[in-house]
Amino acid sequence: DTEVTQTPKHLVMGMTNKKSLKCEQHMGHRAMYWYKQKAKKPPELMFVYSYEKLSINESVPSRFSPECPNSSLLNLHLHALQPEDSALYLCASSQGLDYRTDTQYFGPGTRLTVL
Amino acid sequence: DQQVKQNSPSLSVQEGRISILNCDYTNSMFDYFLWYKKYPAEGPTFLISISSIKDKNEDGRFTVFLNKSAKHLSLHIVPSQPGDSAVYFCAASASTGNQFYFGTGTSLTVIP
C-alpha cells in the first residue's frame, strides 16, 4: 500500500465551526506533514511530525491544531478559521525523517472553503 | 517573497519532442532540489532529485540539470508523452535551517 489518504475531499465550514481533517498512511513512514496550497501558489509547509511528535511548526496560527494519535494517522483540527484560510490542504509522509531530502508521498488533499 | 520560481506557468509540447521545464532560486544556501509531478485531483508525486554536488541526474526519460552559478535548474523530458501532461513543481531545500520551498508550478501539455 503506497497510498496516503485524506478525508474529507471537500469541506465547507463557517468561521465559528470546529472541524477536522484526517490523513492516513500505512507505509510505515516515520514522518508526516501538513501543507497548505492556495490557488496558483506553491504548497507551503505547515507542520512536520517525526515519530508522532511535532518537530516543526512553521509559525502557523493557533486556529490550526495538528494531532498525531499514532504513527499512521495525522489530524488537523480547525477552529475559528477565516475566509483567507480557504485552500487545498495536503498531507504527506516519508520514510526518512529529513523532510528536505526524503521523498514525500502526498495525499490528494482536502479542498477547504471557509465562509 | 518567492525563493523558488517557475516563470513559465504553462508549456505545450508535441508528443515525441523534448519538454524543458525551468526553475530559478534565489537562496544560495539551497543544496538539494526535487521535482514533483501533479495530476488533477491527486497529490504531487516525486519524480527526480539532485544534490548540489552534482550538475546532472538522469532517470529514464527524465534528466535534471543544475547550474549553481546561475541558481537555475531544469527538467528535461525526452521523449515527451501525452501521459506526461501534468503540473510540475520544483522544490529546493537547505541542509541548514528549516528551509524547504516549492516553486509555483508549470503546467505541461503534451499534444498527441
Image (cartoon, coloured by chain):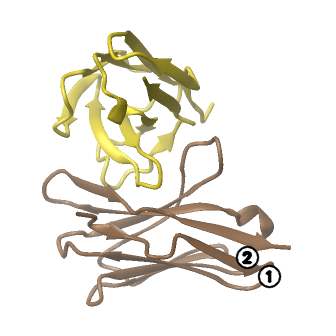
Chain colours: A yellow, B brown
Q: Secondary structure at mark 2?
A: loop
Q: How many marks?
A: 2
Question: Mark 2 sits on what residue?
Answer: B80
Q: Which residue lies at the image location 50% right of the left edge and 20% below the top edge?
A: A12
Q: Are marks 2 and 1 in contact (CB under 8 Å)?
A: yes
Say left or right for A89 vs A69. right
**Labels 2, 1: one chain:** yes
Q: Which amino acid type is marked by label 1?
A: Gly
Judging depth in this view, the residue of A87 and A28 nearest the camera is A87
The quarter of the rendered structure image containing the C terminus of chain A is top left
Q: Which residue lies at the image location 30% right of the left edge and 89% below the top edge?
A: B70
Residue closest to the far bottom: B69
Judging depth in this view, the residue of A78 and A48 nearest the camera is A78
Residue A91 visible: no
Q: Quadrant of residue A82?
A: top left
Say left or right for A111 vs B34. right
Q: Position of residue B75 (x, y in %)?
A: 53, 76
